[in-house]
Image: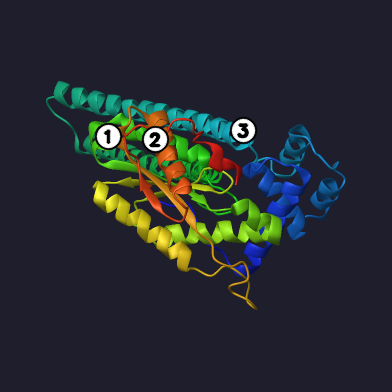
């Protein structure tokens, strides 16, 4: 259920530089912004690179959108949607015109058959020469109709191919819009849609669960080693989550150091088992570089689990999983905690753990 996989090391290093640059300039992590800075740092478009360099220390989204429309008119924001809409409308009108013309052609051929039949029925005696002429005319008309039909089928096939191409571009844009550019897994936008879909059916409510995951003391990692190290850890954890779960488990990055998993068709016990397997895999992993794989030390996560049947809707499910995550933090971190309906200890702000 994931939109992409890890790329080559050179691409990963470039992606790290892109994200670091965007963060330094205060650029929002939108797919279209990532596309601009990726091409600029890759150096494949000198003019684009110069325009990015000329931006202020805090470029506005309007400035970035202007660059995007200039250099990526077919892939930038609403541009690809508008272009696809115009192409589809044009292609559908062409198809309708072809079908109308074909209908007229077939109706003309049908009238010719009717007139020939009436002519034959009205004559008692038909000469050999007349019959031969009738056969020749009908043979020519039939061959012409068949050839015309073949041309129509070829043209319709070409139009279908063009529409499939537009559909493919729209699917790629949708994937890009739903993908976290740093970790290449689903983003918050895709997660919000997926968690809402749980409550569209009774089966979804009965056999789904939400697991929220937060990296322990992530701010300290960034402060000590810098944001590039933090980004490398985020990518590593995303890969571990993907490799440690079934293909049908929905894995997303929902915030800075927060991830979410939506598990389908699993019991409470099985869901806790999935969460624990992911937690252990992250705890045992090494995060560093080629020279020192353990450079950044041990990285752990806390996880909160809530079954969909325990919540009244998407917001309630997220809130309860978040409370379970808070309890895991308060209990010492690096653990999995299942949501319980038991009253919470009075006086505690269950959002405090966000500050570590």
> Image check: 265 left or right of 354?
left
Q: Secondary structure at mark 3?
A: helix
Q: Quadrant of residue 33?
A: top right
Q: Earlier in the sequence, mark 2 or mark 3?
A: 3
Measured as percent of width and height from the top left, residue 161 is found at: 46, 46
User: Outermost residue, bottom direction?
Assistant: 291
Measured as percent of width and height from the top left, residue 299 is found at: 53, 62
Q: Earlier in the sequence, mark 2 or mark 1?
A: 1
Q: Which residue is mark 1?
A: 309
- CB contact under 8 Å: marks 1 and 3: no
Q: Secondary structure at mark 2?
A: helix
Q: Which mark, residue 78?
A: 3
Q: Which mark, residue 320?
A: 2
Q: Secondary structure at mark 1?
A: helix
Residue at image x 74%, y 44%?
Answer: 71
Distance, label 2 to label 3, CA atoms, is: 36 Å
Q: Earlier in the sequence, mark 1 or mark 3?
A: 3
> Image check: 320 left or right of 204?
right
**Above or below, comparing residue 36 to residue 245 in the picture:** above
Q: How many marks?
A: 3
Distance, label 1 to label 3, CA atoms, is: 38 Å
Residue 79 visible in the picture? yes
Residue 251 visible in the picture? no
Local crowd size for mark 3, using a 10 Å CA cut-off: few (<14), some (14–19), many (≥20): few
């Amino acid at each position: 259920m994931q939109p992409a996989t890890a790329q080559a090391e050179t691409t990963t290093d470039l992606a790290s530089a892109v994200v670091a640059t965007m963060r330094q300039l205060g650029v929002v992590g939108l797919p279209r912004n990532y596309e601009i800075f990726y091409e600029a740092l890759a150096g494949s478009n000198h003019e684009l690179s110069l325009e990015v360099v000329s931006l202020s220390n805090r470029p506005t989204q309007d400035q970035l959108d202007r660059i995007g429309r200039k250099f990526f008119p077919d892939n930038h924001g609403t541009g690809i949607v508008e272009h696809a809409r115009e192409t589809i409308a044009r292609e559908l009108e062409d198809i309708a015109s072809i079908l109308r013309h074909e209908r007229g052609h077939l109706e003309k051929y049908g009238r010719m058959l009717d007139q020939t039949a009436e002519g034959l029925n009205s004559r008692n005696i038909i000469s050999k020469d007349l019959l031969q002429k009738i056969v020749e005319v009908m043979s020519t008309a039939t061959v012409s109709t068949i050839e015309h039909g073949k041309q129509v089928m070829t043209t319709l096939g070409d139009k279908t191919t063009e529409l499939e191409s537009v559909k493919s571009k729209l699917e790629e844009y949708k994937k890009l819009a739903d993908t976290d550019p740093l970790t290449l897994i689903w983003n918050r936008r895709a997660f919000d849609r997926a968690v809402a879909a749980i409550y569209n059916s009774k089966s979804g409510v009965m056999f789904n669960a939400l697991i929220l995951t937060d990296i322990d003391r992530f701010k300290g990692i960034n402060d000590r080693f810098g944001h590039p190290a933090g980004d490398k850890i985020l990518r590593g954890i995303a890969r571990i989550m993907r490799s440690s779960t079934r293909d049908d488990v929905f894995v997303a990055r929902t915030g800075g150091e927060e991830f979410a998993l939506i598990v389908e068709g699993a019991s409470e016990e099985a869901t806790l088992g999935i969460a624990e397997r992911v937690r252990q895999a992250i705890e045992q992993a090494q995060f560093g570089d080629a020279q020192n794989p353990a450079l950044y030390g041990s990285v752990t996560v806390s996880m909160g689990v809530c079954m969909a049947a325990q919540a009244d809707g998407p917001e309630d499910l997220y809130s309860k999983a978040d409370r379970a995550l808070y309890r895991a933090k308060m209990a010492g971190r690096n653990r999995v905690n299942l949501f319980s309906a038991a009253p919470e200890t009075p006086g505690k702000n269950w959002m405090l753990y966000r500050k570590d």
